[in-house]
Image: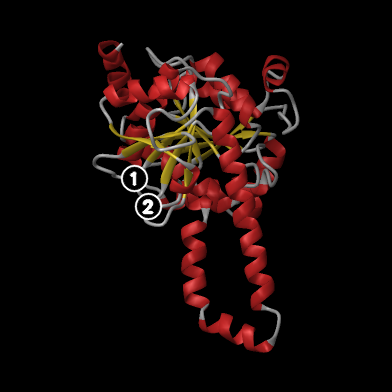
Amino acid sequence: MRIAVDAMGGDYAPHEIVKGAVDAVKSLTDVDNLFLVGDELLVKKEVNDIGYSGQKITIKHASEVVEMGETPAMAIRKKKDSSISRCIDMIAAGEANAVVSAGNTGAVVVASTLKLRLLPGVLRPAIATILPTRDRPVVLIDAGANTDCDPIMLTQFGIMGSIYSKVIFKQEEPVVGLMSIGGEDTKGNEITKKAFSLLGKANIKFRGNVEGHDLFKGETDVVVCDGFVGNVILKTSESAAHVIGSWMKEEFTKNPVRKFGAFLLKEALHSMKKKMDPELYGGAPLLGVNGVVIITHGSSSAKAIYHAIRVACEFVKGRLNELIMNEIGKMEKIG
């Protein structure tokens, strides 16, 4: 399997990106060749500093970088030799099976949509991000690719998210919920009410509406919403997790007695931290495009990049896009 990695994307590029890539080629047997796309001199220095001398890494030069604050469409149009554009070009040309990037999310979405196009029947691509819950991870879709959606788009998101949960998280029959302001089918706006009806007819296990307090219960495998709502949920959850972590650290270190208590709880706290670690889930795939594109957080560490490459391999092996095309094709029967 050939994976193109945007070596210049993210807050800690290229060091953390290269380190994660090297870890991946050393331990992931599915990776035949990994392309590090970016400034050749900088990337080569990082590879040499790490001490990797194997044959599975190839450096592809890209002279430009899309910065985090740039307007996505403008950046892709003007910076044709950016690391993001070159990565997507490699999929389009058949040189790579998948792309991993921690760069400008909007630019990745724009480049993927323009250069790869959408899968047949898909109206819009959607970002499927993973949130930890009490029992198992939940797929939140869309997490920011589309701020305005119609009922058919939301139904397609539910179908794509269900397939992703089934292939990547091995859920035999993923439970799909529609984010709304109440559990009854009469709650929500006109778009969610119509989406409720369509999702109920789709070939998925639809449980109906879910509310914000249902999100982390572990009773739903896929939660469907538009990108505006999804991104607010994602950013709020990240902020809450950060604040809770800060509170715990502050309270456990206030005095020697509490420090001793924290020492006794060390294993339990480590286990809890591991469950909450988003970097273990392998980034967020852009579902619906004609290729495999994995988007990771801008602050991704080497561990996050490693797991994103792992998920990219699982995505390709599971033939996820083929399954999505088949299920989306069946939507014509439900109107």
Residue 304 in the image: state x and y as whole percent: 54, 49
Residue located 31% across and 39% down the image:
175
Residue located 66% across and 41% down the image:
10
Residue located 54% across and 21% down the image:
112
Q: Amino acid at mark 1?
A: Phe
The foreground one among 148 and 137 is: 148
Residue 53 visible in the current orientation: no
Residue annotated with mark 1: 169
Looking at the rendered image, the quarter that the C terminus falls into is top left
Residue 195 in the image: state x and y as whole percent: 40, 22
Quadrant for residue 246, please give it. Answer: bottom right
On screen, residue 124 versus residue 106, left or right, reads left
Residue 239 in the image: state x and y as whole percent: 64, 50
Residue 96 in the image: state x and y as whole percent: 46, 28
Depicted 238 relative to depicted 119: above or below: below
Q: Check if mark 2's residue and mark 1's residue have beta carbons within 8 Å.
A: yes
Q: CA distance from mark 2 to mark 1?
A: 9 Å
Depicted 82 relative to depicted 40: above or below: above
The foreground one among 334 and 72 is: 334
Depicted 43 relative to depicted 241: above or below: above
Q: Which mark is residue 317?
A: none
Looking at the rendered image, the quarter that the N terminus falls into is top left
Q: Amino acid at mark 2?
A: Arg
Mark 2 neighbour class, 10 Å CA radius: few under 14, some 14 to 19, many 20 or more: some
On screen, residue 273 versus residue 207, left or right, reads right
Residue 186 visible in the current orientation: yes
Secondary structure type for disc 2: loop
Residue annotated with mark 2: 136
User: Which is nearer the N-term, disc 2 or disc 1?
Assistant: 2
Mark 1 neighbour class, 10 Å CA radius: few under 14, some 14 to 19, many 20 or more: some
